[in-house]
Amino acid sequence: MKHTKVKELLNSAQTMQEVYVKGWVRTFRNNQFIALNDGSTINNIQCVVDFENTPADTLKRITTGAAVALKGALTESKGAGQKYEIQVSSLEILGDSDPEKFPMQPKKHTLEFLRANAHLRVRTNAFGAIMRVRSVLSFAVHQYFQEKGFVYVNTPVITGADAEGAGEMFQVTSLPLDNLPKTEEGHIDYKKDFFGKHTNLTVSGQLEGETFAMALGQIYTFGPTFRAENSNTSRHLAEFWMIEPEVAFNDLDDNMDLAEDFIQYVIKYTMDKCADDLKFLEGRLLEEEKTKPQAERSEMTLLEKLNFVLENNFKRVSYTEAIDILKNSTPNKKKKFQYIIEEWGADLQSEHERFLVEKHFKCPVILYDYPANIKAFYMRLNEDGKTVRAMDILFPGIGEIVGGSQREERYDVLVEKMKVLGIDEEELWWYLDTRRFGSAVHSGFGLGFERLVLFVTGMTNIRDVIPFPRTPGNAEF
């Protein structure tokens, strides 16, 4: 007999004489009531055991974390807060779980404890909900772009190009580290390496994505990216997933329109599909907020924050205007900001971005036309010669969630920018070819998927929205 998912049973329109379910025990009360969960929903189904006719040895084995298979009648529940329960007629223990050793006992665990048990934390309500939301968000990303006729492109994970020019990359090599081959000049001889050159894990699929956009019109990538940034913050990972659309003939305004429409679509889709999980996560966040001082508590609940993004047009503000607002702001004048804004050209920090969104404009903000010297080489230079056609989208509680730009399509200008920044033309000869042959205006953006999951779930640490976080000093599991 095929087993039925708990979600299907709880959504059933009628009671049934016999059902067969499999799952894991969350709790077992009074030698009678099993709270069973199989991962299909945040909600458990109550299974009522006839303890008088069940062997004592079997009852002892019904412990938190044990895997069980149950047969019984689906009946209307007498208990509050649940529509149905199962009156168990037969029970089989599929896998025991020693309550003395199983870490995920039904009590409140710290997030630090759960990170140390990342292989088991998904068995908790919170992490089950987070990972279901992550899955649905991921599907929504693909659905949005596929519906709009974008081509999904898989860009390389191993690359010789540093798209960001930051140099914080993980090197890939098959050379023996205890006996590295050297050139006559004493440098490492990468010609003897697997790929015959210096290679790294990718920080972005953008450059390769641009080459495909210049033939297929509109493409997107969605894959793992890596940053060897020794950053131990709640917003950074060494390995994360990036969504990067690239569109030929789109200027910066088109790019902003696409990003706004995309974000609103995937959030709406996830809210429709994950109502129970998001309601649970909202409750979890409210409990967490109670432990904070009043001044640090969010003005909005999780669902209010999500609806806030759906219902408000994103405010578009130039970098120059934003700097004026920040310079004249009360926190800046009273030196409450950790990084005081003194002059045009400052690289905005998370505290500045959140001030603009949460305190000043009180809606999502798109900043554009940044100083050229704080942005990447491939961004289109404006006519003023000092700003580029860049844009960042800022969200409440997160700060920057999207970074994008209109790309520099003019061959001569791009080469000149690369020279100034010391970027080797020979390394990126193939990228420059897209400006030699049929160049056109084109734009794109990158969205760190985990930051989006962070926003939608209401979690505050990015390590809690990816199955197995990779951070400095941590590659466990």
Image (spheres, helix red, strand yellow):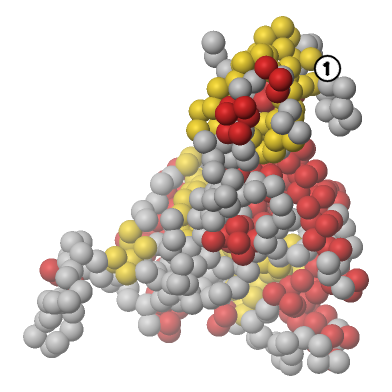
Q: Which residue is mark 1?
A: 76
Q: Residue at (91%, 71%) from the top-left corner?
A: 294
Q: Quadrant of residue 162?
A: bottom left
The disc labelled 1 sits on which kind of residue? Glu
Q: Position of residue 44 (x, y in %)?
A: 72, 33
Q: Residue at (64%, 75%) from the top-left corner?
A: 370
Q: In the image shown, does 339 or 248 lie closer to the viewer?
A: 339
Pick the quarter of the image with the C terminus: bottom left
Q: Is residue 251 above or below residue 427?
A: above
Q: Position of residue 456 (x, y in %)?
A: 71, 51
Q: Residue at (40%, 71%) from the top-left corner?
A: 169
Q: Position of residue 338 (x, y in %)?
A: 73, 87
Q: In the image shown, does 229 or 110 lie closer to the viewer?
A: 110
Residue 385 shows in the view = no
Task: Judge left or right: residue 453 versus residue 180.
Answer: right
Q: Position of residue 249 (x, y in %)?
A: 55, 52
Q: Quadrant of residue 184?
A: bottom left
Q: In the image shown, does 468 or 146 lie closer to the viewer?
A: 468
Q: Residue at (38%, 82%) from the top-left corner?
A: 422
Residue 30 shows in the view = yes
Pick the quarter of the image with the N terminus: top right
Q: Quadrant of residue 461?
A: bottom right
Q: How many marks?
A: 1
Q: Is residue 291 above or below residue 183?
A: above
Disc 1 element: strand
- Seen as rendered, the residue at the extreme left is 184
- Seen as rendered, the residue at the extreme top is 17
Q: In the image shown, does 118 or 206 lie closer to the viewer?
A: 118
Task: Judge left or right: residue 260 versus residue 309.
Answer: left
Task: Specify few, some or many for label 1: CA neighbours under 10 Å numbering under 14, 14-19, or 20 or more.
Answer: some
